[in-house]
Amino acid sequence: MQKIGVFVCHCGSNIAATVDVKRVVEEVKKEQGVVHAEDYPYMCSEAGQALIAAAIKEKNLGGIVVCSCSPRMHEATFRKAAERAGLNPYMVEIANIREHCSWIHKDMEEATEKAVILARAAIAKVHLNAHLYPGESAVTKRALVIGGGIAGIQTALDIADAGYEVDIVEKTPSIGGRMSQLDKTFPTLDCSACILTPKMVEAAAHENINIFTYSEVENVSGFVGDFSVDIRKKARSVDINKCTGCGLCQENVLPRNP
């Protein structure tokens, strides 16, 4: 069972004008594992951070909950303060009782009840938290683009021109996508093939681009920076390196209309 400290911020009048912070402190003291709870006008200030650090050391806290504003604003602030006091920064949880509570309520009783609920939820999460430590992983500097339409082709070209290897997977026999089926493009009414064909040729000839047509992605595993992808290449019954697209093979395979 974690020894938890709870710190409720007034945020000037942003929180305290709508939430009874003293009552929140008294209510969270009843929660299992909470050994310390107090409020302060500005918990993010130097004095507020010092107050948190002192409590961590004196009470030997294993986790803390700060009832304050959005974690987007001050989560890093409170985590750094906890870390300076010897607490793993990932044992810090923020209960957003400003944006999620005081700013959207007018009735103090209702707002206070909700603030207590948010604090209890954060306390419950701290009990389940584990110490985390930053690490490094090798990144494979290679990209996979699924779909060989105009968007996929342009994306692949941008990445390849930046110096990274790119694989394009297209389920149809050729890249080009819907744009290759159009006549004119909006708003200039330019010929779609005039725009698309040079990009198709550039992608096919680019040294950093590998094109897998008539193929589909079957499985993706791994994580950001180190994905593994299984690609199923469908049988063509022709040697694509020798194919010129003349269509003679189709005449010998497909039945003719009587």
Image (spheres, helix red, strand yellow):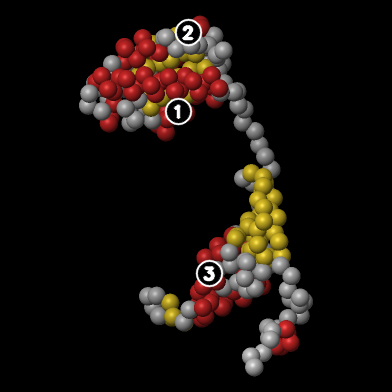
Left or right: residue 113 versus residue 155 is left
> Helix, strand or loop at disc 1?
helix
Residue at 53% over, 77% down = 180
Farthest-out residue, left: 106
Query: How far apart, in angstroms, are the residues tagged by discs 3 and 1?
Result: 42 Å
Q: Which residue is disc 2 drawn over?
A: 35
Residue 39 is drawn in which quadrant? top left
Q: On the rendered structure, is 89 left or right of 67?
A: right
Residue located beneath label 1 in the image: 75
Residue extending farthest bottom: 258
Within 10 angstroms of label 2, few (less than 14), some, or many (20 or more) residues?
some
Image-quadrant location for residue 71:
top left
User: How far apart are labels 3 and 2 at the CA level?
Assistant: 60 Å
Going by the numbered disc 1, the residue's amino acid type is Glu
Residue at x-position 29% and y-position 23%: 111
Q: Is residue 166 left or right of residue 84?
A: right
Mark 3 vs 1: CB contact within 8 A = no
Q: In the displayed structure, would residue 149 be above or below residue 219?
A: below
Residue type pointed to by label 2: Val
Residue 246 position in % (x across, y down): 69, 87
Q: How many marks do you count on the picture?
A: 3
Say which quadrant the C terminus sits in.
bottom right
Mark 2: secondary structure: strand
Q: Is residue 202 above or below residue 83?
A: below
The circle on residue 192 is none
Q: Check the image and report above or below for 28 versus 122.
A: above
